[in-house]
Image: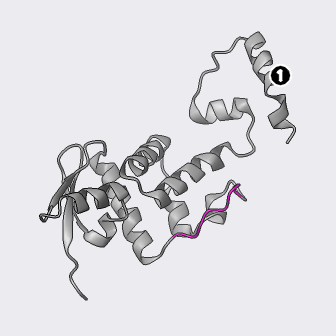
Amino acid sequence: MSTEETIKLLSKEGDSFPVPISVAKMSELVNSMMTEDDDETDEIPLPNVKASILQKVIEFCTQYKTKPMSEIEKPLKSNVMSEVVQPWYAEFVNVEQPVLFELILAANYMDIKPLLDLTCATVASMIKGKTPEEIRRTFNITNDFSPEEEAQVREENKWCEEA
């Protein structure tokens, strides 16, 4: 087995994670920071990503490098993620909502399209086929519309429910 060169990714807390360069380059942000600093960059700070989330991001990228995730069909064919992607990826996003949302933010910040696609599809699967009231309960969103305002919004957007 060849030993691949690594680069250290630094989390918000300053924790250092040695990662194979090919895995780290899945992040367009990391890739561009490496190419800008051709003079042997050995650490890349990621001040917007917590250590616990960065570990999950690295886990995803490592898996993706060896067994790429199948493309996610749009619109989603199911709200069960194991019917949308391979089992490993479905289990990967089977996490608490705060972790899922932090993964979305990290994937967006680090510019890792497959991870962003997976995490956003997971949120979409949580919404798919639900009423506004069920969505509010799922995401703990308070309804700050008066009944009159809500009726007005429903009337103005009736066209999208007819599709």
Counting the numbered discs, the total is: 1
73 or 15, which is in the foreground? 73
| Horizontal relation, residue 8 to residue 116: left or right | left
Residue at 68% across / 15% down in the picture? 145
| Horizontal relation, residue 107 to residue 9: left or right | right
According to the image, what is the colour scheme of the structure?
one colour
- Residue 76 percent across, percent down from the top left: 69, 56
| Horizontal relation, residue 120 to residue 39: left or right | right
Residue at 23% across / 61% down in the picture? 34
Q: Please say whether residue 70 is one of the residues in the magenta stretch.
A: yes
| Quadrant into which the N terminus falls | bottom left
**In the image, residue 97 above or below residue 78:** above
| Horizontal relation, residue 133 to residue 46: left or right | right
Per the image, the residue denoted by label 1 is 155
Question: What is the residue that sits farthest to the right in this orientation?
Answer: 162
**In the image, residue 114 above or below residue 109:** below
Residue at 44% across / 70% down in the picture? 64
Question: What is the residue that sits farthest to the bottom in this orientation?
Answer: 1
**In the image, residue 10 above or below residue 134:** below
Which corner quadrant of the image does residue 105 belong to? top left
- Residue 29 percent across, percent down from the top left: 33, 54
Q: What are the residue bounds of the magenta stretch?
A: 69-76
Which corner quadrant of the image does residue 134 belong to? top right
Q: Please say whether residue 78 is one of the residues in the magenta stretch.
A: no
Amino acid at circle 1? Glu
| Quadrant into which the C terminus falls | top right
Report helix, strand or loop for mark 1: helix
- Residue 15 percent across, percent down from the top left: 18, 51
* Magenta-colored segment: predominant secondary structure: loop
151 or 139, which is in the foreground? 151
Q: Quick one: label 1, few (<14), some, or many (20+) residues within 10 Å?
A: few
- Residue 116 percent across, percent down from the top left: 49, 53
